[in-house]
Amino acid sequence: MFQTTIRPDQELSAIDPKLAWSAWEATNQEPWDARRVRHLMRRGGFGANPSEIKQLVDAGPAKAIDSLLGKSKSQSLDAFEQESAQIGSAVLAGSSIDSIAAWWLHRMLHSPSPLVEKMTLFWHGHFATGADKVNDTELMVQQNKLLRDHALGDFRQMVHAVSKDPAMLLYLDSASNRKTHPNENYARELMELFCLGEGNYTEHDVQQLARCFSGWEIRRKSFRFNPYQHDSGLKKLLGQEGIESGEEAIDAVLAHRSMPTFISGKLVRFFVFDEPNPTAEFLEPLADVFRRSNFTIEPLVRTILSSKLMLSDWSIGKKVRSPIDFVVEWMRNLQMTTNLDRLAKGLEGIGQALFNPPNVKGWDGGRAWINSSTLIGRSNLIVDLLREPATRFGRTDLDAWVKSERLTSQSQWLEWLETSLLSVPLNASDKERLQSVVASSDVGLDARRKLLVALSQNPKFHLS
Amino acid sequence: MKRRSFGQLGLGTCAGLAIGSAQPGGWLQVLASELAQQEDRHSDSERILVVVQLSGGNDGLNTVVPYRDELYAKSRPKLGIPSSDVIKLDDQLGLHPSLRSLEDRCSANRFTIVQGVGYPVPNRSHFESMDIWHSCHAKKDRTQSGWLGRWISEQDSNPSTDSTAIHLGSEPLPLACQERGVQVPSLSSLEQMRLKSKVIDAQGLEMKSEKVASSEGSGSLLDFVSTSTVAALQVSERLEKILAQPDASGDFPKTAIGEKLRAVSRLILSGVKTRVYYVTLDGFDTHANQPGVHATLLRQWSEALSAFLSRLEQSGQQDRVLVMTFSEFGRRVSENASQGTDHGAAAPMFLAGPRLPKIIQGPNPDLSDLDDGDLKYKIDFRSVYAAVLDSWLGTDSRKALDGDYRAEAQRLELFS
């Protein structure tokens, strides 16, 4: 008999790939309820507040994904874009990286299409470019817009656009690529990190691809082709002969059979689970979706988000929260606003500086988010946010907000925090421990805030 | 993992106090007096290893310059360091002029250059090559464990609460320090480890007293986060005490690597029982505009190293701390047209600290015999690791390296 469900304790290797990526349907054991809505909104966006969750339980999974994309919210989208543009022009004038990080955080916190922001973040980690080296905030913002515009569009167009993006050209030294002895930096990373994965090309391919990119320069902050520095000889790349230009070379890289699997794998790890690394065979149904859509990203992401694997209990708690997920979801749930420049700095302290990923490979994610420093740092960041004078909850203070939400007793408050912020439920000993923390004295915080801080120090808080 | 028998220490359920071996059970059964007694038994003379990783691929040829080699001058028309600028070590080799602060260490026989270090079938991807150096394995035989992680798992539980190894830096924990069941704390700085809310104390004590292994069993994400939380609390509490003491670390350059080595010296001088420290300095991927960038990075590395060694000398600890520096690969022999160099292969490693028999170990690079434009390796990095593990740390290297490199290591004669 064919297996039709995925058990929560099943090993990945025992799950049929076709089943995993087929569309999820509600069952008696796994209904479309608030818990599942929260799971989807957490992974595909940055969480949702109680009224949004109620609406989406009634609407069903397909509509929930539409809502992550901001479909049928055109009015609020326009208003949001206007507000974001105003903040954007103000921060650009200051040209500090913390301020543009704050501008992006504002988008993540308030965008009516959170999946677009989440995908922009994904591509920022994928086509990782560091502001410290580029040293030009305007170019970083320009790249951020490029990634957002293409975030769910044609992947091949995005790769072509990124290859001519000034911030990228500066970051990977393409801007100084001359024909006499071309520099291999961009050529290598295009294949290793952006399109194919290590092991799918040779050192010879790297050298040939570098020749194709010779003469790709920047003039007045824009891409320019300099025919005098271009090596116009014919090159053989990835088994294809007769390649001359950089554009032809990018097409040859994109046509490699490992590309759809490589991109699907990275998306699965971003949205569904951290471990173990899925095999090519397991990813094949997704690679097939990607190929059949002519490498349009939205159908692939929709297939992943609406899949049996994604929406079954199996994937709940299977990811470590990134610093951004951790903070933004917390803030969206509590309708919290704060000093975003400080928040951007705080995120840097726990391992996720927007616009400054650690290197060209981006953030490793998973277990790499967690260590002694980041755990202490996460706790300290929550305390800082609670003590920050600019912090508001639903435009008022925490105590008034809690009253308006009718969460006045400690047990109501704990229950609300648990359901809205945790993917893995607390057990009896967790709860006992939290109660004892609240009862303890001398911590400089009142009981309500103490509970919030204590919860954020529970290991379960770091899982998504 | 080798575990002390329970009777030996009279600790009841578990001797795993060490964060390094992540055995959080049995905490509250340990009496303070017992703890103090065990710490006494451990002498302060144990040897320490500090690993410095130069990330991005350090240009070995412009670090230890074959200034008399015509092929060097030919391959590096713009980037070559002229013989008049190098700090001459002998009639063939000289140090990059930014390494002035290491000159005295060389003449005092407290610095060794190991030439031509690499491994078979060099990989020119940063990430793959780094993983090879960390895991000691090519991709196909690799697990998520590193040589130091495996070494830690083999050590007797450290009788103090100090972890066996500490990583200082805000990047993720290096693969070299990873191994299932092993917790190596990553500290972005000592000060950053202060908890702002004491809430965690009460909760933390509770946590330490219970088995944190989750229902999903060991190895799950939740289990990992739980043991990491316990480790973080322990380190935070220990550092709280150390930070309460006056800082005797002295003058260090105000650079990131200077701050990291300052922190390491502070921990060593405070009597912390950690045996391995791991720090990194990034930025060596000099595809373009190499001269200024490389000079700055070499200066940062050598000045921080020099300040660190001086501090140890002042307190008479210079003979028990070895600093080992490596990079994931060297760079292409020929420069590119962007005044930079692309990814290469073999390159030198560096040892510093105690008295060492020779300044230069291993044959000088042969620029007339290249592999696709790159230097061929003459010494396998794993034999250098083996020498460090066997002869310096005094432990058997075979399990840590997943192989026997002892014979090669002995031939190197890195330690007297």
Image: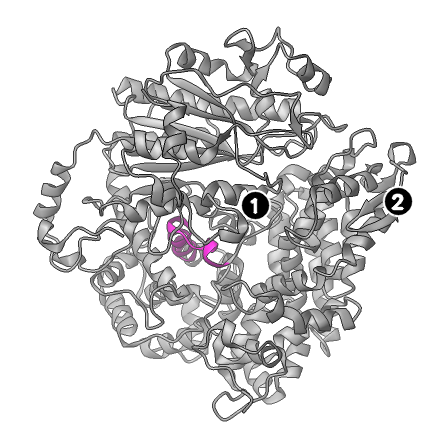
Residue A356 spot, x, y in % from top left = 60, 46
Residue A153: in magenta span: no
In the displayed structure image, the side of residue A373 where residue B235 appears, left or right:
left
Q: Position of residue B138 (x, y in %)?
A: 52, 47
Kind of residue at badge 2:
Glu
Label 2: state its secondary structure.
Answer: loop
The image position of residue A119, as x and y in percent, is 66, 63
Query: As displayed, is residue A1 above or below residue A185?
Result: below
Q: Quadrant of residue B288?
A: top right
Q: Which mark is residue B219?
A: none
* Neighbours of disc 2 within 10 Å: few (<14), some (14-19), many (20+): many
Chain on which label 2 sits: A
Task: Determine which of the numbered discs, if any, sits on residue B128 in the image.
Answer: 1
Q: Nearer the viewer, residue A118 or B46?
A: B46
For label 1, the crowd category at 10 Å Cα-Cα, with few meaning under 14, some 14 to 19 and many 20 or more, is some
Q: Secondary structure at mark 1?
A: helix
Direction front: furthest residue: B407
Q: Nearer the viewer, residue A118 or A331?
A: A118
Instruction: Look at the image and tell me whether residue B99 can be seen.
Output: yes
A52 lies above or below B380:
below
Residue B236 visible in the shown view = no
> What span is colored magenta in the figure?
A366-384
Residue at mark 2: A244
